[in-house]
Amino acid sequence: MTQLEVLHDTAKTAIAEERVGRPVFLRCFVQVPPGEGDLEEALVDALGVASGLLEGAIARVFALGGLETGHVSVSLELSGGQRALVAACRAPAGPGRLDWLLLGNKGSLCFEDELPQGRLAASARADLQAVWEAVARSLDDHRPVNVTEDVSP
């Protein structure tokens, strides 16, 4: 199990123990170290974290920036009404960082530290193909995209 998966599972346990109540918002910011890692992979993992912690299908996305510019921000709307803001960028120097804040209706969880090693399991990423296609379409079209309806060419 990777460090990112351990962190994800720890947050899921806190949610299951009702320490934060029902999760309603997540901010997740990832800085990829210069010359290391892949910005797209980091963003896909962050989208997976958002989907997993907020426990809902991602229904709508609006993305700004671009992989070529080194920064992508994605606003997410989930099927249960939850929201998330996910961003990934290249760090100007030094190690990568991960910063997330999960708000529930009874409390919050936060994490800020160096970027954990490893990726989410391939099975967690497999369900994100349609979401990633919607993000790419939103970046190209500069508009919000419904994941289930607007991703076909």
Image (tube, grey):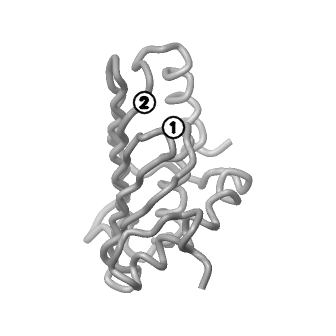
Q: CA distance from mark 1 to mark 2?
A: 7 Å
Q: Relative to 64, is 121 above or below?
A: above
What kind of residue is marked 2?
Pro
What kind of residue is marked 1?
Leu
Name the foreground residue: 35 vs 124: 124
Q: Quadrant of the C terminus?
A: bottom right
Q: Residue at x 33, y 31 (%)?
A: 103
Q: Badge 2 is on which residue?
A: 23
Q: Quadrant of the N terminus?
A: top right
What x and y, as percent, mark residue 120?
62, 51
Q: Residue at x 42, y 41 (%)?
A: 81
Q: Are marks 1 and 2 in contact (CB under 8 Å)?
A: yes
What x and y, as percent, mark residue 46?
48, 54
Q: Is residue 31 visible?
A: no
Q: Badge 1 is on which residue?
A: 53
Quadrant assignment, res 41: bottom right
Q: Earlier in the sequence, mark 1 or mark 2?
A: 2
Furthest toward the right, the residue is 123
Q: Count neighbours of disc 1 (C-alpha within 10 A) and say few if under 14, some if 14 to 19, many if 20 or more.
A: some
Q: Is residue 109 visible?
A: yes
What x and y, as percent, mark residue 4?
54, 45
Name the foreground residue: 121 vs 22: 22
**Image check: 107 left or right of 45?**
left
